[in-house]
Amino acid sequence: MVDFLKGNFTPKRPVTDGDGDGDARAELEARFERQALDRLGGSIAYVAKRKVLWDDEPTDPVGRGKT
Amino acid sequence: MVGVPERAGELGWKLVADMERMTWGRSGRDALANVERNHPLLTRGRSLTALRADPPGEGGDAIVIAAGPSIKRHDPIARIKRSGFRGAIIATDSALFYCLRNGVVPDLVVTVDPHHERIVRWFGDPSLSLARLEEDDYFRRQDMDADFARELETNRRILELLDRHGRGLRLALATSASAAVVERAFAVGMDVYWWNPMFDDPDVEDGVTRAVRRRNGLPCVNAGGNVGAACWMMAHAVLGKRRVALVGVDFSYYADTPYRNTQYYAEALALVGPDALDSVYMRVHNPHLDRWFFTDPAYMSYRQAFLEMAAEADCETFNCTEGGILFGDAVRFTSLDAFLETTG
């Protein structure tokens, strides 16, 4: 098709073939998808290894057993 | 997500594996913002440590009441009342209205979810309006407490009940709770016990949990992903109860429930569209009831987390929900009546 279209004006700015726009679109779609996924997340975190860390416990984890 | 290739449940399982990151994306930033906003208010309550020193309820038994769809099918509170149960009754925020309207003031209520305007509805939202309801159908379309479908009327009843019974009612109030929940708790005179939910491994020196603990000095509790699990954790790890029964902890929906009436329907629809919803929801057969249920990724992750925690817990766990998908080696799936017969 481009062999036949000769154009009848000169663009004010250079026009690219759109590869950059495609990357941006893909990035945008990925971001929207991640946001959609995040909305399926839970209420609060689950931490596998401990129950309670009391306020009177030392903060140094060395030698501290599981509560 | 156009043209979902996964078959029934397959996408759901993939999302379960990614739940930690998704939960942080959904609520992590709000939770931390709430922790900071609540900091000046901590002196208006006590540390959860005070509750450990003076646990409510007689003996070593506790019942956790949550608001899963089994509640309206089995009405467990009627049987709990008839039994004269004297142990601790611990309610999720979502089950508070169910308890109060049935004449039961729980020994402890727990709240943890940081959502800025939904969670306060469980306590009665003084600012609720018809205009707000038109923007959000979260409560009225769900298969849970049917009264929440009649939103304005129910909100008025909760406001009245909590204004009447809220003073002195113990509330394990997570620092992640929204400003609306905190304001409501103090407005009705609840007896507040503050705690931090764990956000990550508390043994990691530069982790979020450690930073929050350094900031406010409060105990950090593994909430297990949701408020029902947090109640169970409070029962045995804070109050020291040795036998903990669960009612209304379904982590799932009855097989005849339309997708539209599930908690995450709008989010699932936005992700995959109406024709691929089967890929998100997972079906589970409960062999104790010989009955099928289905669940979404968040609830499936709650189930898995709970079973992991129960295996390590120093209490016996009795699931008396009489429905749902929470069963496994560390959880005794039994009837509520059978549990109540063994209580002192």
Image (cartoon, coloured by chain):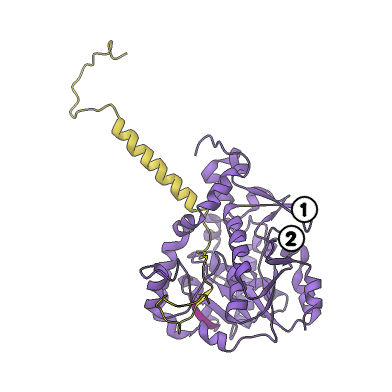
Chain colours: A yellow, B purple
Q: Amino acid at mark 2?
A: Gly
- Label placed on residue B323: 2
Q: Secondary structure at mark 2?
A: loop
Seen in the picture, residue B315 relative to B299 is either above or below; the reply is below
Seen in the picture, residue B266 relative to B184 is either above or below; the reply is above
Residue B94 seen by the camera: no
Residue B343 in the figure: left or right of residue A14: right
In the rendered image, residue B253, in percent from the top left (x then y), is placed at 68, 55
To which quarter of the image does residue B121 belong?
bottom right
Q: Chain of mark 2?
A: B
Q: In the orientation shown, which residue stands out farthest toward the top? A: A4
**B89 vs B130, nearest the viewer:** B89
Q: Secondary structure at mark 1?
A: strand
In the rendered image, residue B299, in percent from the top left (x then y), is placed at 60, 57
Residue B284 seen by the camera: yes
- Label placed on residue B291: 1
